[in-house]
């Protein structure tokens, strides 16, 4: 597919998929349920962390997780409410102990940086922010690293890149509550479906769904829209659902 025709098709699908109607069908609905900034960003990070597998299962699991946390995830975390959790299953391989791990880490980040945005924006690049976030999570948990927080060195970091898309990009689907990071600096949240569609379109040659693939695809998408390359996440998703 030539670049011009690729850009036209991507723009068509972006406009078709990225509408307010999409929110009710997607995990992004959970951070949208809150009005306080801290609740929204915590909900974005936690929802993205369990955003793998079937969408209906993700939505049910997220309902379960936020029901545990009460009306304010921020209050739940900062008051230590997570300490009362046991270790019941939340989503596939994600258990209450994993949620406690993240809550301890997030609480540390608020105490240390004031705002989660400050932590990510203090890093030179998005990947550095992901590495910093993972290290802060570990430091808050006795130096232990979690498989649910990707390392930012070789991994595609789909979950954190998804959370960052939600937090940085402005509507109609994304929240756009972080202003210190520009959409131009974001990277595509690469999952198997997006990667498969990108390869079919000739936008991605690399076979592994890793960090190098994320960078390569995002750089290709920047040719089409330098200021907001990850908006095409919606297009690749929509095209994949339609054509697979």
Image (spheres, helix red, strand yellow):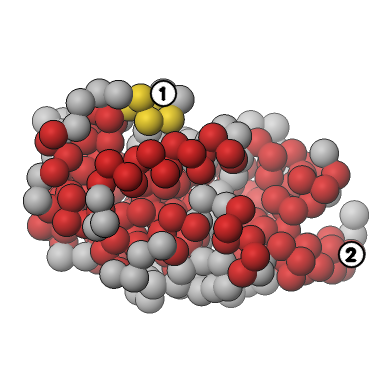
Query: Which residue occupies 59% across, 44% down?
Result: 190
Spot occupied by residue 28 in the image (x, y as percentages of width and height): 50, 56
Spot occupied by residue 159 in the image (x, y as percentages of width and height): 46, 44
Query: Which residue occupies 12% across, 53% down?
Result: 78
Q: Judge the density around disc 1: few (<14), some (14-19), many (≥20) Cα neighbours within 10 Å.
A: few
Location of residue 61 (image quadrant) = top left
Spot occupied by residue 17 in the image (x, y as percentages of width and height): 71, 62
Q: Secondary structure at mark 2?
A: helix
Mark yes or no: residue 98 visible: yes
Q: Is residue 15 left or right of residue 147?
A: right
Q: Secondary structure at mark 1?
A: loop
Q: Judge the density around disc 2: few (<14), some (14-19), many (≥20) Cα neighbours within 10 Å.
A: few
Q: Is residue 188 left or right of residue 1?
A: left
Verify CB contact (< 8 Å) between mark 1 and mark 2: no
- The residue under label 1 is 93
**Label tally:** 2
Q: Is residue 96 left or right of residue 190?
A: left
Spot occupied by residue 173 in the image (x, y as percentages of width and height): 56, 67
- The residue under label 2 is 5
| Placement of 19 over or under 133, stated as above or below | below
Query: Which residue occupies 24% across, 28% down?
Result: 97
Location of residue 204 (image quadrant) = top right
Query: In the picture, which quadrant includes the N terminus?
Result: bottom right
Dot placed on the residue nearer the N-terminal end, 1 or 2: 2
């Amino acid at each position: 597919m030539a670049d011009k025709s690729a850009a036209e098709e991507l723009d068509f699908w972006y406009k078709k998929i990225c509408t307010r109607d999409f929110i009710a069908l997607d995990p992004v609905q959970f951070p949208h349920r809150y009005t306080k900034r801290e609740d929204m960003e915590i909900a974005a990070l936690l929802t993205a962390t369990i955003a793998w597998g079937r969408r209906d299962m993700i939505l049910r699991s997220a309902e379960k997780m936020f029901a545990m946390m009460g009306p304010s995830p921020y209050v739940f975390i900062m008051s230590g409410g997570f300490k009362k959790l046991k270790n019941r299953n939340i989503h596939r391989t994600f258990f209450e102990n994993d949620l406690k791990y993240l809550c301890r880490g997030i609480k540390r980040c608020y105490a240390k940086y004031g705002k989660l945005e400050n932590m990510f924006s203090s890093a030179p690049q998005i990947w550095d922010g992901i590495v910093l976030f993972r290290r802060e999570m570990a430091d808050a948990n006795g130096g232990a690293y979690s498989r649910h927080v990707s390392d930012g060195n070789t991994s595609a970091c789909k979950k954190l890149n998804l959370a960052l898309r939600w937090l940085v990009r402005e509507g109609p689907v994304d929240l756009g509550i972080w202003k210190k990071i520009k959409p131009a600096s974001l990277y595509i949240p690469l999952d198997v479906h997006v990667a498969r569609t990108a390869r079919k379109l000739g936008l991605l040659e690399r076979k592994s769904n890793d960090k190098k693939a994320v960078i390569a695809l995002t750089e290709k998408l920047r040719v089409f829209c330098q200021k907001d390359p990850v908006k095409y996440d919606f297009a690749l998703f929509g095209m994949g659902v339609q054509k697979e």
